[in-house]
Amino acid sequence: MSASGLSIRELEAKYPLYCKDLKMLIKLIRQGKTSSQLQRMFCWHRLQLLHRSLPKQYKSPELLTLMIKTEFSTVNDA
């Protein structure tokens, strides 16, 4: 199984790539992108691939999005 030519093993070995995708997701959420817009992003697909392949190690992008949005609302309310 691969996403854009990268295997699961390659994705997992490149933890900085995961971090980059997560940062991109945070940036897109801050920009106010909708859920449907986020789901079309390349970083979403890589995060989803890791979650489907290794669910104990990686959270789903849906859960990550919810957690990030909750954190933003908590910070803004303070």
Image: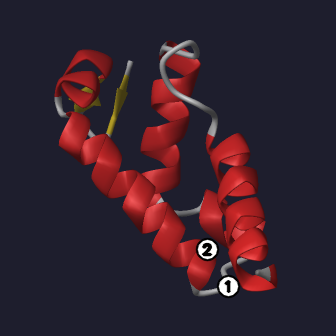
Crowd rating for badge 2 (residues with CA inside 10 Å; few <14, some 14–19, many 20+)? some
Q: 5 left or right of 27?
A: left
User: Which residue is painted at 45% across and 27% down in the image?
Assistant: 50
Residue 35, horizontal then vertical, whole percent: 75, 65
Quadrant assignment for the N terminus = top left
Q: Look at the numbered disc 2 and give the secondary structure of its residue.
A: helix
Q: Pointer 1: what residue?
A: 32
Q: Are marks 1 and 2 in contact (CB under 8 Å)?
A: yes
Residue at left offset 23%, top offset 34%: 15
Q: Which mark is residue 29?
A: 2
Report the side of 76 relative to 20 (left or right): right
**Quadrant in the rendering for residue 23:** bottom left
Three-letter residue code for mark 1? Gly
Display colour scheme: secondary structure
Image quarter where the C terminus lies is: bottom right
Q: In the depicted view, which residue is nearer to us: 12 or 40?
A: 12
Marking on residue 72: none
Query: Residue 36 in the image: x percent, y percent?
Result: 74, 66
